[in-house]
Image (cartoon, rainbow, N blue to C red):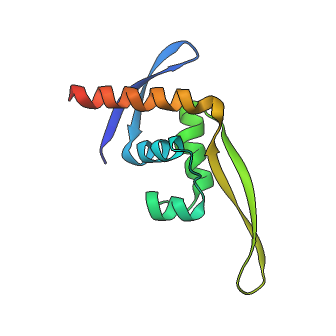
Amino acid sequence: MTEMIIFVAHNKKTKHMTVSKSTQAMLTYLLTGKAINIKTCYTLFGFSSPAREVARKIEQKFNLNLVRTKKIFKSRYGIAGYYYDYTLSKTDYKKVKQILDAEKKANKKK
């Protein structure tokens, strides 16, 4: 697995982090304003559990809080269900942009 090494300012300290290609793809997707849900997570990123991956790869690692929107649906058989859309909060756009810019700089140095 290819990983990029970036530096992220966290609590006014420089912290050494590695960012996988899938995490980069998820951050870039969120930066466009689109939502990650079970379908997009599986088809675009290859993960079957967006709740776990969003928490592990984005929220905990970069100290971000994604907005969760509950979507209620009814299946073609009449069974009710729900899923969540995960979107980037407006206050975190700048932080994600800095993370991706740092990754691009680290990638150019190679």
Q: Residue at x 69, y 43 (%)?
A: 67
Q: What x and y, as percent, mark residue 68?
A: 71, 48
Q: Residue at x 42, y 32 (%)?
A: 100
Q: Nearer the viewer, residue 42 or 87?
A: 87
Residue ranking furthest to the top? 12
Residue ranking furthest to the bottom? 77
Q: Is residue 28 above or below residue 78?
A: above
Instruction: Using residue 74 as the reference point, say whether residue 50 is left or right of it.
Output: left
Q: Is residue 105 above or below residue 48?
A: above
Instruction: Using residue 51 as the reference point, say whether residue 74 is left or right of it.
Output: right
Instruction: Using residue 71 as the reference point, say whether residue 54 is left or right of it.
Output: left
Residue ranking furthest to the front? 32
Q: What x and y, as percent, mark residue 73?
A: 75, 71
The quarter holding residue 88 reads: top right
Assign the C terminus to one quadrant of the image. Answer: top left
Q: Nearer the viewer, residue 1 or 104?
A: 104
Q: Is residue 95 above or below residue 85?
A: above
Q: Residue at x 56, y 45 (%)?
A: 33
Q: Is residue 76 above or below residue 43?
A: below
Q: Residue at x 61, y 33 (%)?
A: 64
Q: What x and y, as percent, mark residue 106?
A: 30, 27
Q: What x and y, as percent, mark residue 4?
A: 33, 35
Q: Nearer the viewer, residue 16 or 81?
A: 81
The mark total stands at: 0
